[in-house]
Amino acid sequence: MKVEKDMIVSVHYTGKLTENGEEFDTSIGKDPLTFIVGKGQMIPGFEQELMGAVKGDKKTFELEPERAYGEHDPEGVQKVPKDQFPPDIQVGMVLAAEMENGQQIPLKVVEITDEEVTIDFNHMLAGKGLTFEVEIMDVNEQPKKECNDDGCC
């Protein structure tokens, strides 16, 4: 069975920064990563590179920022009054901001002055080229829903 839209795919992977080879994530030593192709669970380029692969295939590919987490957006960097943060805040900390809809987004502290804290809402890998080493562990169709006689599933 080949990887295509709506398939359930399990992979082992290692992700590295293309510029220096620094590893930023891996599934090795853990359960494989499982996702449904085409549902927005993975970055677009990752899914595109796996299309047509079958169980047992091993692939290495590079993704430019546009096919990964996008370019770094300067508008995602903001200055906030320092008194809105805990006193032990430090540069490099990753915090979570809660949006009005309850969703939490990570933000990174990039600078601290006496009055302000500069935070970056961009994804930590925005603007970076990524290299992935991937092994396809399994490819399956989604289970079909059982429907009753009146067409309700």
Image: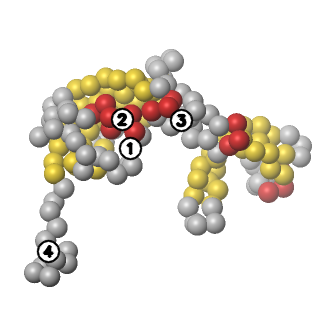
The first of marks 2 and 3 along the sequence is 2
Q: Residue at x 21, y 48 (%)?
A: 7
Dot 2 crowding, Cα within 10 Å, few <14, some 14–19, many 20+:
some
Question: For the residues marked 2 and 1, what is the alpha-carbon distance in whole angstroms?
Answer: 7 Å
> Which residue is disc 3 drawn over?
70
> Which residue is disc 4 drawn over?
147
**Farthest residue, direction front:** 150
Dot 3 crowding, Cα within 10 Å, few <14, some 14–19, many 20+:
some
The first of marks 2 and 4 along the sequence is 2
Marks 2 and 1 close (CB-CB < 8 Å): yes
Indicate the position of residue 87 as horizontal and vertical percent values. Answer: 79, 52
Indicate the position of residue 13 as horizontal and vertical percent values. Answer: 32, 33
The first of marks 4 and 1 along the sequence is 1
- Side (left or right) of 80 relative to 91: right
Q: Amino acid at mark 2?
A: Phe
- Side (left or right) of 140 relative to 128: left
> Which residue is disc 1 drawn over?
42
Question: For the residues marked 3 and 4, what is the alpha-carbon distance in whole angstroms?
Answer: 41 Å
Q: Dot 2: what SS? A: helix
Indicate the position of residue 84 as horizontal and vertical percent values. Answer: 79, 57
Q: Residue at x 46, y 34 (%)?
A: 68
Q: Dot 4: what SS? A: loop
The first of marks 3 and 4 along the sequence is 3
Q: Residue at x 24, y 50 (%)?
A: 6
Marks 4 and 1 close (CB-CB < 8 Å): no
Q: Amino acid at mark 1?
A: Met
> Which residue is disc 2 drawn over?
46
Q: Amino acid at mark 4?
A: Cys
Marks 2 and 4 close (CB-CB < 8 Å): no
Question: For the residues marked 2 and 3, what is the alpha-carbon distance in whole angstroms?
Answer: 13 Å
**Farthest residue, direction right:** 114
